[in-house]
Amino acid sequence: MSPRRKYERVLLRWHEMPLLLGLVITWMALWHEVSWMSLVSGVLVSIVAMRLFYLPPVELAGRFNIWWAARYLAYFLWHLGLASAQVAWLAVRPGPPPRTGIVAMQLRTHSDFLLTMVGLTVSLIPGSLVVEVDRFGSVLYLHVLNTPTEREIERARRQTARIEELLIRAVGSREDLEAVR
């Protein structure tokens, strides 16, 4: 039997362990129970789901910079609070509803992981939402609240570029780091 065939018959591979762990934790959270039964059933259900619904492996850069991760987290939390206050004011202020716009944002990275992280971060900050992703072109299409002028649209682009930069510096590959510098 060839080594390739032997590899294909393995029930679980090392690079799938984070996915398995995440699915088991989700399973246990859904049942609101931490027990041996929920752990074993979670592992079984997760393995079946992983085999039935194949996902391509997410390739990580294998590097983590704690300083830039802390800066990313601080940036995110600051803008989360600031944007929440701004959106709350837009909701209660007198006058017409704010203008919105769709903004295309070309990212420098081609990593699926970073593309997802940037999209999630932008969507979690109130006032913006990812409505479309061009995975192969690394373009995020954002629905942005309160964009009456080009200045506000450019501010949304700068904010997204800053989020991407912070994430690249925290967990990006060497090639992505070169694109930022």
Image: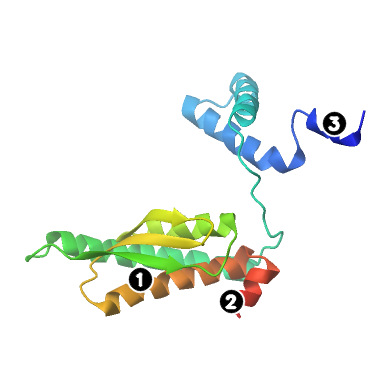
Residue 148 at least partly seen: yes
The relative height of residue 159 versus residue 52 in the rendered view (above or below) is below
Q: Disc 3 marks which amino acid?
A: Arg
Q: Which residue of the protein is positioned furthest toward the right in this rendering?
A: 1
Residue 34 falls in image quadrant:
top right
Q: Of label 1 and label 3, which has the lower sequence position? A: 3
- Amino acid carrying label 2: it is Val
The image shows residue 7 at horizontal and vertical percentages of: 83, 34
Marks 1/3: CA–CA distance: 50 Å
Q: Which residue is mark 2?
A: 180
Identity, as a three-letter code, of the amino acid under mark 1: Ala
Secondary structure of the residue carrying numbered label 3? helix
Mark 1 vs mark 3: give the one in front: 3
Residue of label 1 = 156
Tag 3 residue: 5
**Vertical comparison of 115 with 42: above or below:** below
| 175 on left or right of 180 | right
Q: Is residue 19 left or right of residue 119?
A: right
